[in-house]
C-alpha cells in the first residue's frame, strides 16, 4: 500500500498541464557559443650572410670532363646571379677530387688568381677558366677522393698554398660534383672524422652539397657510381642533394647559389597552427607573388613545402625564397581553435 501512495501523486503530476506565456529569451547563439577562428600571419624577410666562401670540388676524370663539367660551366651564370651586384662578399674556389701531388687540395689558378670574388672583372668567365685549368685525371678510381682533397684544401693547405681563401667570419659552402663515389683513404681523415671536423668548425654556417649519383638513378648500374659517402656527409651536415644525371644544371646551380648566399629554407612559426590550415606565399622584392602546395616531406612528389610539428616550422623543398623577399605564413592558431587564452 505504501508503494501505491507514491505512484499515485507522480501520475497526477505527469498529467498536469502548464501554460507558458511570453517570448523565449534570446541568448545570442548556441550554448556554448562558436569560437571565431583566429588567423595568424607570420611575415619573415629573407636575409643574406655578409660573407660566403664557396669551394667547388670537381671530379676531373674523363667521364665528367667530357660532358657534365661542360654543362656546369655553361650554366654557371645561374649560380652567379645571387652574387653579382648583391653586396655579398664572396670567394669561389675550385679544386679537383685528384690526390696527385700537384692537385691534392690546391686551388686551381689562372693568371695568379686562385678564386673568384666581388672584385673579379668577369666572374663567370674566371670560374670557367679555373675549372678548365685542372688537368684531366687518368681515370683510375684512386683519383676520386673528394673528402680527402676537401680536407686538405680547407685545413692542411689553408695557411699554405690556399692562404686567404677562407675567412673566419664567412660561411663555408662545399659543393662536390662527381659521377663516382668517394674513395678517399683514412689518411689524412676518415669519413666520420671529416663529418665531426665540419661540425666543429667555427663558422657562421657550414654546408656540404652533393651533386652525385643517387640510389635508383640510371647511373647506379655501375657498382662504384652511387655517391654513398658524399650523401652521408650531406645528410649529417646539411646541404643540397641533386642527381648527377639531372642535366642541364641550371636548376641545381640556382639552388646552390641561393644557399651559398645565406638564404634560408626553414621558417619557424610564432605559435602552434591547426593542422591543414597553413597557407604559404612569397613576395619577391619586385612584387611577384608565389604560391605553393603543402606535402608531407620533400621525398614525396608535388611537394613545395612541409610542416614539421616538433620544430613548429615550414620548410621549402625545391624553391628557396630570394634575398629580401617576404615569406608570408598564414594559419589558424591552435589556442584560438581550442578555446584557449590568447
Image: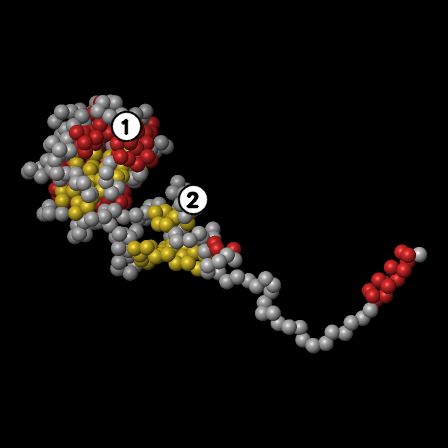
x, y (%) of residue 126? Answer: 12, 42
Instruction: Give the mark nearer the N terminus: 2 vs 1.
Output: 1
Residue closest to the eye, 115 or 50: 50
Q: Looking at the picture, does residue 341 appear above or below residue 151? A: below
Q: Is residue 254 visible?
A: no
> Outermost residue toward the right?
1
The quadrant holding residue 297 is top left
Q: Is residue 329 visible?
A: yes
Mark 1 element type: helix
Left or right: where does residue 98 sit relative to residue 292?
left
Residue closest to the eye, 131 or 284: 284
- Which quadrant holds the N terminus? bottom right
x, y (%) of residue 40? Answer: 41, 58
Residue to which mark 2 is pinned: 310
x, y (%) of residue 109? Answer: 10, 35
x, y (%) of residue 113? Answer: 9, 39
- Residue that appears at 37% across and 50% down: 268
Crowding around mark 1 (Cα neighbors within 10 Å: few <14, some 14 to 19, many 20+) is few
Left or right: where does residue 342 sit relative to residue 127?
right
- Residue that appears at 20% across and 43% down: 170
Mark 2 element type: loop
The quadrant holding residue 72 is top left
Q: What separation in Å lies between label 2 and label 1 (alpha carbons)? A: 29 Å
What is the number of the mark on residue 193?
A: 1
Tell how many labels.
2
Left or right: where does residue 165 sit relative to residue 141?
left
- Residue that appears at 66% across and 73% down: 24
Q: Looking at the picture, does residue 285 appear above or below residue 29? A: above
Crowding around mark 2 (Cα neighbors within 10 Å: few <14, some 14 to 19, many 20+) is few
- Residue that appears at 46% across and 59% down: 342
> Outermost residue toward the front?
2
Q: How is the image coloured?
A: secondary structure
Amino acid at each position: 500500500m505504501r508503494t501505491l501512495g507514491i505512484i499515485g501523486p507522480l501520475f497526477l503530476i505527469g498529467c498536469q498541464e502548464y501554460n507558458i506565456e511570453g517570448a523565449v529569451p534570446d541568448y545570442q547563439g548556441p550554448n556554448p557559443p562558436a569560437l571565431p577562428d583566429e588567423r595568424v600571419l607570420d611575415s619573415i624577410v629573407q636575409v643574406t650572410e655578409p660573407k660566403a666562401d664557396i669551394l667547388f670540388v670537381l671530379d676531373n676524370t674523363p667521364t665528367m670532363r667530357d660532358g657534365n663539367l661542360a654543362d656546369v660551366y655553361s650554366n654557371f651564370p645561374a649560380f652567379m646571379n645571387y652574387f653579382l651586384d648583391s653586396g655579398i662578399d664572396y670567394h669561389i674556389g675550385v679544386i679537383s677530387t685528384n690526390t696527385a701531388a700537384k692537385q691534392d687540395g690546391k686551388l686551381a689558378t689562372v693568371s695568379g688568381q686562385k678564386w673568384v670574388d666581388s672584385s673579379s672583372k668577369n666572374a663567370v668567365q674566371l670560374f670557367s677558366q679555373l675549372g678548365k685549368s685542372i688537368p684531366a685525371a687518368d681515370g683510375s678510381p684512386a683519383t676520386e677522393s673528394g673528402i680527402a682533397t676537401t680536407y686538405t684544401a680547407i685545413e692542411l693547405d689553408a695557411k699554405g698554398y690556399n692562404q686567404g681563401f677562407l675567412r673566419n667570419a664567412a660561411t663555408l659552402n662545399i659543393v662536390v660534383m662527381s659521377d663516382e663515389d668517394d674513395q678517399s683513404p683514412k689518411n689524412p681523415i676518415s669519413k666520420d672524422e671529416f663529418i665531426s671536423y665540419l661540425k666543429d668548425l667555427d663558422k657562421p654556417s657550414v654546408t656540404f652539397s652533393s651533386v652525385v649519383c643517387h640510389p635508383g638513378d640510371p647511373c647506379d648500374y655501375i657498382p662504384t657510381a652511387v655517391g654513398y659517402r658524399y650523401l652521408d656527409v650531406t645528410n649529417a651536415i646539411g646541404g643540397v642533394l641533386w642527381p648527377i644525371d639531372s642535366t642541364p644544371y641550371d636548376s641545381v646551380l640556382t639552388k646552390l647559389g641561393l644557399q651559398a648566399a645565406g638564404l634560408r629554407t626553414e621558417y619557424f612559426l610564432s605559435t602552434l597552427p591547426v593542422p591543414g590550415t597553413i597557407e604559404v606565399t612569397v613576395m619577391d622584392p619586385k612584387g611577384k607573388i608565389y604560391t605553393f602546395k603543402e606535402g608531407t616531406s620533400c621525398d614525396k612528389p608535388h611537394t613545395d613545402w612541409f610542416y614539421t610539428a616538433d620544430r613548429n616550422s615550414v620548410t621549402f623543398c625545391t624553391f628557396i625564397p630570394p634575398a629580401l623577399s617576404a615569406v608570408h605564413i598564414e594559419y589558424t592558431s591552435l589556442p584560438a581553435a581550442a578555446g584557449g587564452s590568447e
